[in-house]
Amino acid sequence: MRVLIADDHSLFRESLRGLMESRGHEVVAEARNGDEAVDLAGRVEPEVVLMDLNMPGKSGMEAIREILEARPKLPIVVLTGSMDDEDLFGALRAGAQGFLRKDLEADSFFELLEGVAAGEPALTPELSRKVLREFASRKAAAPDQVDPDALTERELEVLQSMVAGVTSNRSLAMHLGVSENTVKFHVRNILDKLHLHDRAQAVSHALRSGMVDLDESEGV
C-alpha cells in the first residue's frame, strides 16, 4: 500500500514510517502541514492518506476537504491524539474514511488499515458506538424514508454487523458462521441494491436511514 503521512511532528512521522515499512507498506511522502498534504496527495498518487488534524497553517480537516475535491475516491484516515467527539464527527462529515487514535495497538491499526483498501471504514468499536448514537439522535429528529424490503433478512444481518464495526470479510465470516465467499456475495448484493460503491458508504447509509436496529448493533 502506498501511504502519505501528514503530521507536524517529525519524530512521530519517522516512527510511523518505520512501522509501516516493517509491515511491507511504502511511505511515498511525508507532509508537515495541511498545505503540503494537499500538494503531495495530488503529485505522489498515494493509495491512502494518514492525516493528523491539528497542524500549523491549514488544518487536517481543511486538507481532507481539498484533497477529496480533487480525488474523491482517495481513502483518508485520520490518525490523531484528539479525544474530542467534534473532531470525530467533523472528520467523518469532511469525508474521512476512518478515525483512529495514536494510542491504538499496532495490530489493531494494521487490521483496520487493511480494510480501508476494500472500502471499509476504519473505526474502533468504541468510536463506532459513538457514531451510532450520534446518527440515532439525528434519525429521531428527522427520520429518512427507506424501503424496508430493499434487503433480505441475511443482508440486513450483514449490514448490521458492519455498522457495529465488524467489517472485514474474515471477521464477518467468523461472526456470522459463513464462508468469506458468502460474505462477499451478500456485501455485493447490499451495495448493488442500495446503489452504493463501497462498505463505508453502506455503513453511512444504514446509520442515516435507520435500516438497522441501532440497539442490536451496539450489542454485536
Image (spheres, rainbow, N blue to C red):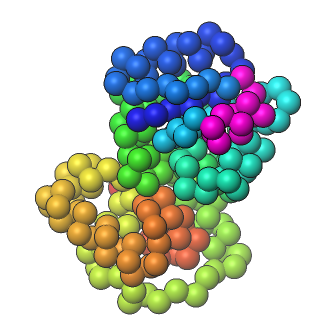
Name the residue rendered at 65%, 75% in the picture: 140
Residue 68 picture location, percent across and down: 66, 52
Q: Which residues are magenta?
A: 32-43
Towards the viewer: 21 or 151 = 21
Query: Can you say whether 138 is above or below 126 in the image?
Result: below
Name the residue rendered at 48%, 41% in the picture: 47
Magenta residues: mostly which secondary structure? helix
Query: Can you say whether 220 is above or below 39 in the image?
Result: below
Q: Is residue 156 left or right of residue 39?
A: left
Q: Is residue 26 left or right of residue 166?
A: right
Residue 23 picture location, percent across and down: 34, 23
Q: How many marks?
A: 0
141 falls in the magenta region: no
Res. 27 in view: yes
40 falls in the magenta region: yes
Splitting the image into 4 quarters, where does residue 185 fall?
A: bottom left
Residue 115 picture location, percent across and down: 38, 46
Name the residue rendered at 37%, 67% in the picture: 159
Towards the viewer: 123 or 132 = 123
Name the residue rendered at 47%, 89% in the picture: 147
Res. 157 in view: no
Query: Can you say whether 18 is above or below 175 in the image?
Result: above
Towards the viewer: 152 or 64 = 64
Residue 172 picture location, percent across and down: 27, 55
Query: Can you say whether 95 is above or below 149 in the image?
Result: above
